[in-house]
Image (cartoon, rainbow, N blue to C red):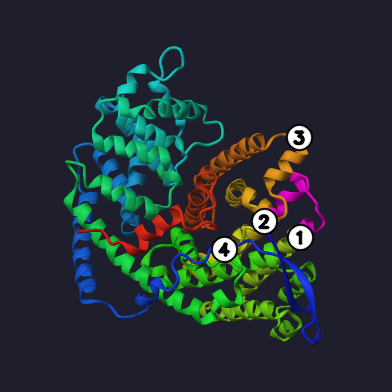
């Protein structure tokens, strides 16, 4: 644990004396990006952007004709839909894709006829696209690829494209999809030895990329950026599709750069680096997190407000986890409970600044939702923030009491401190249009929906697995790893193995939730999926890329917000 002895004002600001307080310091590295994006802080639109926008409209029209037109085989339409989705431009064609997949679902048994009957690629692609769209088709369609002994046929080993599609389809599995559990092991075994085979160089690249990051668990825009470089190497790629993708990526990147510029200016005005030197300065990384779930151009205001809120939540998290004394944390928790600017003066100076920022942000949210005629729902956002700091305070008390709770005590609190409730409430308030009613808020907050709980489990456990060593070294309350080890008397590796299994099961719950009939807007379910995907990427390979942002996350930011695609 890193300790520093500092002379700070007493928790009661009216007292003139100071006392020496021991504070933990995590020694987080400074911002990777600093003022880099400030140069983009402008509302002006370039002439080249206007030209690109016109060109995009024309290409979208051509692609719509392709989607609506007849094709020689249904498999060709499946491949086109898959390419559109993987390249990251499906948001332009949601209605057309919905109509095409609905029609395919109604007649999908036709795909089993003739040449398609033993086409592993087509069947696996059909399965993945339909489950992604919310159709709970049976995994039994893969039984046809097994031999008389119940094993997948050895003849499939040479079908690299089929194995790759099977591998991707397996990540859509539900509980009880035993055939997909077998299929995943089979596909991985043979794909991992791809370099020994005769597949094309580009297909080998696709396999290596998929093994590192399956489509279903990747951030859509990041996966789109990665797939573009693979798709353009395909000898028979569609030039209309490729041109549209590149133009759209670069145009949207320009918008995201401007948003980052505006956010950087706001961040500098707050003087975060000086006022909160103990906390993680991760504005740009938080923007990637938020835009990972909400990248479309029409969601500019939602992206900017959510990035502000959760960048400040990161600071609050570090106040509770690292810097604040227990006495100070109790004062801050009470201040949030009261939600009144008048109580600010009873806080230490650094907390006064943070508290005022929170209230100002909520005033900004209030303005936005009032403008949309939805101010009666702001109550939910305030309650979510109150629940957040209550959970933070409980964890802080555990640390100061040297208490390692049982998993049954730990998980309810730990599932609150990851701010999923706050995130989803904000999404309902700001980014879901007129489809959201009080019933949707009640579903989210009071019915304990399985898909939301699964999202929380993925987030909490992957965060714990990735960050627990660093946290314990600097002085931190217990994570699920420590709680599990103590409760069951197992090693760290055994605990992490079990927690990884729980993450895998939570993904099955998410997949089932996407395919369940519900009155909840599908748009919300897709956002839940997308933000879970962000978590899967940020905490991948047991590394906390958000806290240690100078590693892989820097590369992701560069690919999405710095380097345009060459045309």
> As drawn, is 127 to the left or to the right of 48?
right
**Displayed quadrant of residue 299:** bottom left
Tell me which numbered mark, 2 or 1, is placed earlier along the sequence: 1
Q: Give the magenta-colored segment's residue range.
A: 396-414
Query: Helix or strand or loop: what does disc 1 sit on?
Result: helix
* Front label number (4 vs 1): 1
Q: Position of residue 349 (x, y in %)?
A: 69, 81
What residue does disc 1 label? Answer: 394
Is residue 403 covered in magenta? Answer: yes
Residue 47 to residue 232: above or below: below
Neighbourhood count class around disc 2 (C-alpha, 10 Å): few under 14, some 14–19, many 20 upward: some
Quadrant in which residue 363 is drawn: bottom right
In what element is the residue under mark 4? helix
Which residue is labeled 2 in the image? Answer: 474
The residue carrying mark 3 is 489
Q: Residue at x 73, y 64 (%)?
A: 390
**Which residue is denoted by mark 4 in the rendering?**
423
- Earlier-in-chain disc, 2 versus 3: 2
- Mark 4 vs 1, N-terminal side: 1
* x, y percent for residue 382: 65, 72
Q: Is residue 397 magenta?
A: yes
4 or 2: mark nearer the eye: 2
């Amino acid at each position: 644990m890193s300790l520093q002895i500092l002379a700070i004002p007493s928790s009661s600001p009216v007292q003139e004396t100071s006392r020496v307080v021991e504070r933990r310091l995590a020694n987080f590295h400074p911002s990777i990006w600093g003022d880099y994006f400030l140069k983009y802080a402008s509302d002006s639109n370039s002439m080249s952007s206007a030209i690109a926008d016109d060109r995009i409209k024309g290409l979208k029209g051509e692609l719509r004709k392709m989607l609506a037109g007849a094709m020689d085989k249904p498999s060709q339409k499946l491949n086109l839909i898959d390419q559109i989705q993987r390249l990251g431009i499906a948001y332009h064609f949601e209605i057309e894709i919905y109509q095409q997949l609905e029609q395919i679902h109604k007649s999908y048994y036709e795909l089993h006829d003739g040449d398609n009957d033993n086409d592993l690629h087509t069947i696996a692609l059909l399965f993945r696209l339909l489950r992604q769209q919310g159709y709970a088709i049976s995994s039994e369609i893969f039984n046809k690829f097994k031999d008389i002994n119940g094993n997948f046929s050895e003849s499939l080993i040479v079908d690299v494209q089929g194995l790759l599609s099977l591998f991707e389809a397996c990540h859509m599995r539900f509980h009880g999809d035993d055939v997909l559990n077998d299929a995943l092991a089979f596909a991985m075994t043979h794909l991992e030895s791809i370099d020994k085979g005769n597949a094309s160089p580009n297909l080998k690249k696709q396999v290596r990329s998929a093994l590192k990051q399956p489509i279903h668990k990747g951030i859509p825009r990041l996966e789109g950026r990665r797939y573009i470089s693979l798709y353009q190497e395909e000898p028979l790629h569609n030039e209309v599709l490729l041109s549209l993708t590149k133009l759209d990526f670069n145009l949207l990147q320009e918008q995201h750069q401007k948003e980052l510029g505006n956010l950087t200016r706001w961040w500098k005005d707050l003087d975060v680096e000086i006022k909160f030197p103990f906390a993680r300065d991760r504005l740009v990384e938080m923007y990637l997190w938020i835009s990972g779930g909400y990248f479309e151009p029409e969601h500019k205001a939602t992206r900017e407000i959510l990035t502000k809120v959760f960048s400040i939540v990161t600071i609050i998290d570090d106040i509770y986890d690292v810097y604040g004394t227990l006495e100070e944390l109790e004062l801050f928790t009470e201040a949030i409970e009261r939600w009144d600017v008048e109580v600010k003066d009873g806080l230490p100076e650094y907390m006064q600044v943070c508290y005022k920022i929170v209230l100002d942000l909520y005033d900004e949210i209030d303005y936005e939702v009032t403008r949309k005629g939805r101010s009666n729902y702001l109550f939910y956002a305030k309650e979510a923030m109150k629940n957040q700091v209550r959970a933070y305070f409980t964890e802080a008390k555990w640390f100061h009491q040297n208490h390692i709770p049982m998993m049954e005590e730990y998980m309810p609190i730990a599932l609150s401190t990851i701010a999923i409730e706050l995130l989803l409430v904000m999404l309902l308030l700001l980014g879901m249009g007129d489809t959201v009613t009080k019933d949707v808020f009640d579903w989210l907050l009071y019915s304990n929906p399985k898909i939301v709980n699964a999202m929380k489990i993925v987030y909490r456990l992957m965060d714990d697995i990735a960050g627990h060593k660093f946290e314990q070294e600097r002085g931190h309350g217990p994570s699920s790893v420590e709680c599990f080890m103590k409760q069951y008397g197992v090693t760290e590796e055994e605990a992490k193995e079990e927690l990884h299994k729980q993450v895998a099961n939570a993904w099955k719950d998410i997949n089932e939730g996407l395919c369940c009939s519900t009155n909840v807007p599908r748009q919300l379910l897709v956002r839940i999926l997308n933000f879970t995907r962000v978590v899967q990427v940020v905490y991948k390979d047991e590394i906390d890329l958000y806290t240690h942002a100078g590693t892989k996350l820097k590369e992701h930011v560069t690919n999405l917000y710095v380097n345009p695609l060459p045309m």
